[in-house]
Amino acid sequence: MKINNNILGFFYNKLDFPIRYLYCKLPIINKALFWHLYSSDFKKLDQHFENMKNIIHKERFNFKNKTCLELGPGNSYINAYNLLMNGAKKVILVDKFPRYIKTKKQKEFFRKELDFIKQKYGQQKLFFFKKGRIDNQYIKFIEKDFAKTDIKEKVDFVLTISVFEHIKNIEQVIAKLTKVIKRGSLMYHSIDLRDHYNFANPFLFYKYSKNTWERYLTKEGVSYTNRVRYEDFIILFKKYGFKILNENIERFHINEKINKEFQNQGNLDVGILRMVLQK
């Protein structure tokens, strides 16, 4: 989230340890804020998709008859819908902690997404939606840690948007990608390296040691952010045989003191990383 009020932001940042701790450790607080923190903005995701598509097309790649994989779709199908409407044969969605909450708000969210896609492409009926339900022939959802899946089919394209920063077993996930993606195929990753606590202070979490961060201030399935940095990602992707075709980074000012565990790392001001990679 982002705190724009300077006075509120000051106290929010000064009290970040107890606020983070309580949010991670007290389920009642997590449930109270669940929808607000984890609901996707499908219109922003749609714009991100269009930007990504333009970048991918420059690499002479299109989605026609492709099998695509999205990791961490959250509570949104918008990317899957867009991939199918752009010619994809099938989309596999994998999420260890799915946000598909069976509530009135979520049902309304799905309805609005579908209406948005119909209007965007000028279609009254969607070929992947039959009898009020998504046809599994076109969209397959797997509720599991991707590294532990047994996906048999090879995929032509992999997409993630603000997901890799939340993965704990990140090297295992990248290693798994090498097994499911076809040689010569592409991946697009948009990785948000900022502290998600308050985007107005994007590197507030640099002040904490690894032990403090992992033990007290973040929790898988609730608020987990791995703090893997730009150069770490580059090393991991190259280690597993992925070639970087296109890279775009955004840098932000560092306001906080940096814990000694980070001080020898370079490019700590990289806040957003967007990459096209090829196997």
Image (tube, rainbow, N blue to C red):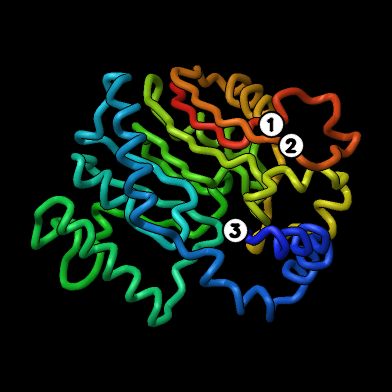
Disc on the earlier residue, 3 or 1: 3
User: For the residues marked 3 and 1, what is the alpha-carbon distance in whole angstroms?
Assistant: 19 Å
Q: How crowded is mark 1: few (under 14 residues within 10 Å), some or many (20 or more)?
A: some
Name the foreground residue: 73 vs 146: 73
Q: Identify residue type, mark 1.
A: Asp
Q: Which residue is drawn at 34% across and 32% down?
A: 156
**Residue topped by disc 2:** 254
Disc on the earlier residue, 3 or 2: 3
Q: Find the residue positioned furthest to the right.
A: 260
Name the foreground residue: 90 vs 118: 118
Q: Which residue is drawn at 58% across and 25% down?
A: 237
Q: Position of residue 242 (x, y in %)?
A: 52, 21
Where, by quadrant of the figure, is residue 1 drawn?
Answer: bottom right
Q: Identify residue type, mark 2.
A: Ile
**Residue topped by disc 3:** 1
Q: Is residue 279 visible?
A: no
Where, by quadrant of the figure, is residue 97 drawn?
Answer: bottom right
Label for residue 269? 1
Residues at discs 1 and 2 in contact (Cβ within 8 Å): yes
Q: Residues within 10 Å of mark 3 (few under 14, many from 20)?
A: few
Q: What element carries label 3?
A: loop
Q: Where is residue 246 in the image (x, y as percent from the top left)?
A: 45, 20
Q: Is mark 1 on a helix, strand or loop?
A: loop
Asked if residue 65 is positioned above or below residue 150 in the image, the reply reads: above
Q: Position of residue 64 (x, y in %)?
A: 20, 34
